Amino acid sequence: MNGEGWIEPGAGPGREPGGAGITATTAPAAAAQAGTSSDDDQKPATDDEVAAAIATCQRLAGTLFPWDITRALELALLKTFCVPSIAGLLSRSGEFEQRPRKRYDDTGLMVAELLRHGPTSAAGTAVIARMNRIHGAFAISDRDYLYVLSTFVCEPIRWLARYGWRALTPAEEEALFRFWALVGERMGMTAIPATLAELVAFNQAIEAEVFANAPSNRRVADATLAMLLGDWPAPLRPGLARVLGSLLSAPEAAALGWPEPPTALQRAVLLALRLRSRLAALSQRLRPPQGTRFYSERPTPSYGPSFQLEQLGPPARLAELNRPRWAGRQRRIGLTGGIATGKSSVARLLAERHGLPVLDADHFAREALAPGSPAARAVLERYGEKVRPGAEGPPAEAELGGSPSPTSDAGVAIDRAALGRIVFADAAERSWLEALVHPIVQERFSAELERLAAAPVVVLMIPLLLEAGLEELCSEVWLVDCDEAQQLGRLIGRDQLSETEAQARIAAQWPLERKRPLVDRLIDNRGSAQALEASLASHLEARPLWSAPADAPPASGPDRLSP
């Protein structure tokens, strides 16, 4: 390991005692100088402004400040460990403690590729899709997603103001904000602050209110530090660890369970880094940089001189992460969501207003359990009177000590409400029912897709599409979305359930916050039926249903700005 690789690219330095870099008073001023506003009705950036922001960030990270921005993003990683919910999740995943070097390189390579190519490029879109699929296996809160995003903006600004050969200009700060806000939007994040000043305020509030010591913080931070110092001679490691710790503030060090950094050491490191920056500035004037120096353009310990995106991610999940989407000529829209979020309403609009064929997994499941079907007989055999509608007692054969004959159940309809109460109260029974019904439903899908092979677009409405790993059936995935409280209220009202029963049914599926990052389009169903129709129409205007080229496979990777 050399001087270019102190820590994993993905974090940013802490403020020196007394506070350097962005402050509650200087950040809004900087945003105002850059021409931004904190008003809620701020106009979205134009395409030209977005392109200019991407170009500015590429120049900052690849040419002007590659060393400084890498260091800033490295320390941002350490600061995310100060949030117990983030560190706890990382500790449970085992990646930082079992494979810290690979996790380090994976993060650095994906961040560098975003900066190198931009989030709107094909390469950037593929990186975002990869990140979404990796993160999709975990229930990560919007707050934690947004805090990590905020560090990618705030920490480079702070580092360069504190240690760099010059601070970023207001226009450059604004470009950094726009770049990472665009990445967040394309990852499916919600409630991204509209201005740089608001994002800084959010970042500061999390650090003041949420940073707290927890055992997982120390475990993940220590494992990362050991990896970073592993290539240095053993006698130097304790001193280097103290140098690294001196870049943290006292509260940040306390949250990691590390000793408070001595003031004298902090001052010495500050002087050393400022001297290094003056020498770097002189070098740039004498020998202007030729080309770029992104982390992804250099060899890495994990992958050598080059890497493939398909190599990035937890080794145990690579087969799942690399599972392809449908890439045939037909456009296949996977329509999913949570229970009672409004999937059927969207499917009805697509069928009635736009003439699309809709294959409904729930409809096929009801067919599978039709009276007299093999699956229905299996359910009746397993649950008996519990799922017979209006049954007063056991059949005559049972009264005589025998068992019901197969023909006695030929015309018996299953009480679906009773069956639902059984399987949603017992995960083992739900698994048994899914193992019985899902293969039948998949056969129906295969048959219907073959029948509709000539149709240019087909909608596959599958409630458990993500849970069952059926993305490979689809060229794109749409999620019908609403607030969790709305979902609960709608389910109680629709199915006449108690709150406990409704919560059990919602808990049987992945939470919406886990699904959102995994899809290509979010269909907002938080309002009225008219608002839902307008939301769907806005997506269709951005990319008409019939616009996919017939002679090319659809592009992979999520795109929430250009659905």
Image: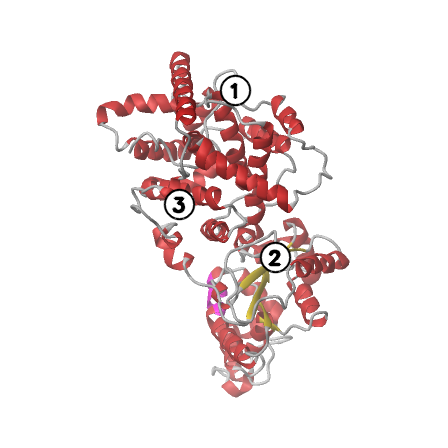
Start and end of the magenta stretch?
A: 428-434
In the figure, 441 relative to 467: above or below? below
Front position in the image: 413 or 327: 327
Q: Is residue 308 above or below residue 65?
A: below
Mark 1 — residue? Answer: 20
Distance Cα–Cα, label 3 vs label 2: 32 Å
- Asked if marks 1 and 2 touch (Cβ < 8 Å), the reply is no
- The label on residue 563 is 2
Q: Amino acid at mark 3?
A: Ser
> Where's residue 368, x and y in %?
55, 77
Residue neighbourhood size for the residue with mark 3, other residues' Cα within 10 Å, grouped as few (<14), some (14–19), many (≥20):
few
Please give the label number shown on residue 93. 3
Identify the residue at image location x=49%, y=36%. 59
Whether pointer 3 and pointer 2 mark residues with C-beta atoms closer than 8 Å, the reply is no
Indicate left or right for 417 with 125 as reference.
right
Mark 3 lies on a secondary structure that is helix
